[in-house]
Amino acid sequence: MMDETDCAQAYAECFRNAALAAHFRKIKEPSPKKPVAIRPASDPGAGPDGAGEGRICPDCGKPIPAARLAAMPGATRCTRCEAKREVDG
């Protein structure tokens, strides 16, 4: 017969296994987004000062704002996607 501790351990194990299965499904699924070429800041299409709009975020496919590129010239993602990437790990 199971006591409260045994029930809690069984519940925790089921929850952990479900979370791990969901995590591994997420890793194995191919990304629906197409890869996007990123132009370097020195690219003439990047703007007159080399830090303007023109580079594309590879995650969402939108242009990286000029303000972000001015603050971080080496940025490869928009602010929202970079924050999401840092949280997700």
Image (cartoon, rainbow, N blue to C red):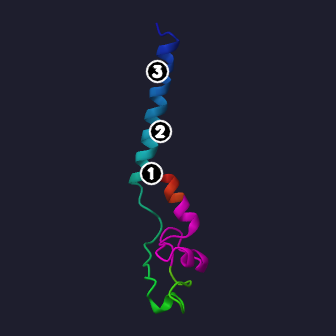
Kind of residue at badge 1: Lys
Helix, strand or loop at mark 1: helix
Magenta part mainly helix, strand or loop? loop
Q: Residues within 10 Å of mark 3 (few under 14, many from 20)?
A: few
Q: Which residue is mark 3?
A: 9
N-term-proximal mark, 1 vs 3: 3
- Above or below, comparing residue 45 to residue 38 in the picture: below
Disc 2 from disc 1: Cα separation: 11 Å
Task: Please identify the residue farthest to the top as the structure is shown.
Answer: 1
- Real-space Cα distance between discs 2 and 3? 15 Å
- On the image, numbered disc 1 is attached to which residue? 26
Q: Position of residue 13 (x, y in %)?
A: 44, 27
Q: Which residues are magenta?
A: 56-83
Q: 74 or 60: nearer the eye?
A: 74
Give the residue at the far front of this rendering: 71
Residue 64 appears in the figure: no
Residue 74 among those drawn in magenta: yes
Residue 19: image tag: 2
